[in-house]
Image: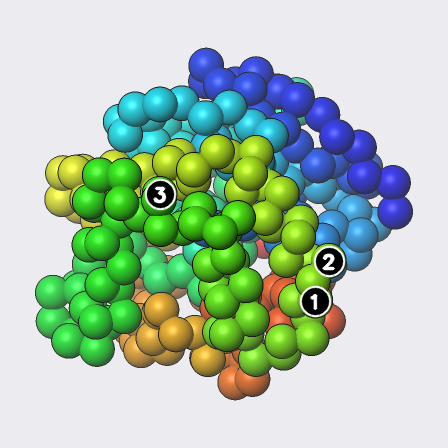
Amino acid sequence: MNIRHEWRTVNGVRLHCAVAGAGPLLILLHGFPEFWYSWRYQIPVLAERFTVVAPDMRGYNQSDHPPRVDDYAIDQLMQDVLCLIHSFGEERAVVAGHDWGGAVAWNIAMHSPEVVDKLIILNMPHPKLFVQNLLTNPKQLVRSAYIFFFQIPWVPEALLSWNDFQFLDRAFRDTAVRREQFPDEVIEQYKEAARNSGTLNGPINYYRAAARAAPAEVAPPDPVVRVPTLVVWGEQDVALGKELNDHLERYVPDLRLRFIPDASHWVQQDCPKLVNQYMVEFLGQPA
């Protein structure tokens, strides 16, 4: 598979994108602490039918790293993707996201459904359900304690970058179901991307900006997603409990929900063949 590396200036930032294939546009949005490479198993399969664009989101790897917390507000992250779609000469796209990329994808589908042909979410709860669980679910509050730690200035950056980003070994290997999916050469790719990001200040600022957001920005008053949606969820996620999907159908009328019992938060890397199967099946169904 020939992956092209392109740079697009959108919404005031320069984004590095991995691009492959031809056809309708499909955007893949990564999570924390990743970069476009987390979709390496999906890109070749999806590129058989789509023009696949997997950007390094702002603050990550080879994309620009704006300095202010406000630069990472959800409206800025959404605008990056909307402008990216237009930069490829399209008005609509399939939008897929994992973790933080999933949060951005959810919000785009809620705020700008006319831009989203179909929505694919991997291990990221609907914003409304996430907020509800943080308020009422003690287990999820404990799982999300790192979000509160990330609000401290500079200390998280120092800890995460210590010893050449040693935390990445634990972040992936200690929480993955299939540790063999994260050999040294894969971890080195993530470490190199983290080095390109400096101290990971940008990626951590995603969490700071979210904590400062108004309630309506975190969980919009009209939280219904009105586009066909696939949610794939690795049940062995140590940060996000399976129960975050309870009553999801209230907010996503056209929903396909697929649980993978033996996959972690890194679901598309733990079980790439099954994730690819679910995505291809969903994309082959009429909208």
Lower sequence index among marks 3 and 2: 3
Where does the image place residue 24, in percent across and percent down from the top left? 71, 38
| Image point (22%, 39%), residue name | 153
Q: Nearer the viewer, residue 233 or 223?
A: 233
Q: Amino acid at mark 2?
A: Glu
Disc 2/disc 1 C-alpha distance (Å): 6 Å
Residue 157 numbered tag: 3
Residue 106, visible in the rendered structure:
no
Q: Residues within 10 Å of mark 2 (few under 14, many from 20)?
A: few
Q: Amino acid at mark 3?
A: Glu
| Image point (27%, 30%), residue name | 69
Give above or below for 47 relative to 272. Answer: above
Which residue corresponds to mark 1?
Answer: 183
Residue 144 relative to residue 122: left or right? left
Give above or below for 130 relative to 58. Answer: below
Which residue corresponds to mark 2?
Answer: 185
Residue 249 relative to residue 31: left or right? left
Q: Residues within 10 Å of mark 3 (few under 14, many from 20)?
A: some
Q: What colour scheme was applied to this rendering of the protein? A: rainbow
Lower sequence index among marks 1 and 3: 3
| Image point (56%, 84%), residue name | 262
Where does the image place residue 129, in percent across and percent down from the top left? 25, 63
Give above or below for 70 relative to 38. Answer: above
CB-based contact (under 8 Å), mark 2 and mark 1: yes
Where does the image place residue 154, in percent across and percent down from the top left? 27, 39
Local SS, label 1:
loop
Disc 1/disc 3 C-alpha distance (Å): 24 Å
Give above or below for 184 relative to 274. Answer: above
- Quarter of the rendering containing residue 95: top right
Local SS, label 2:
helix
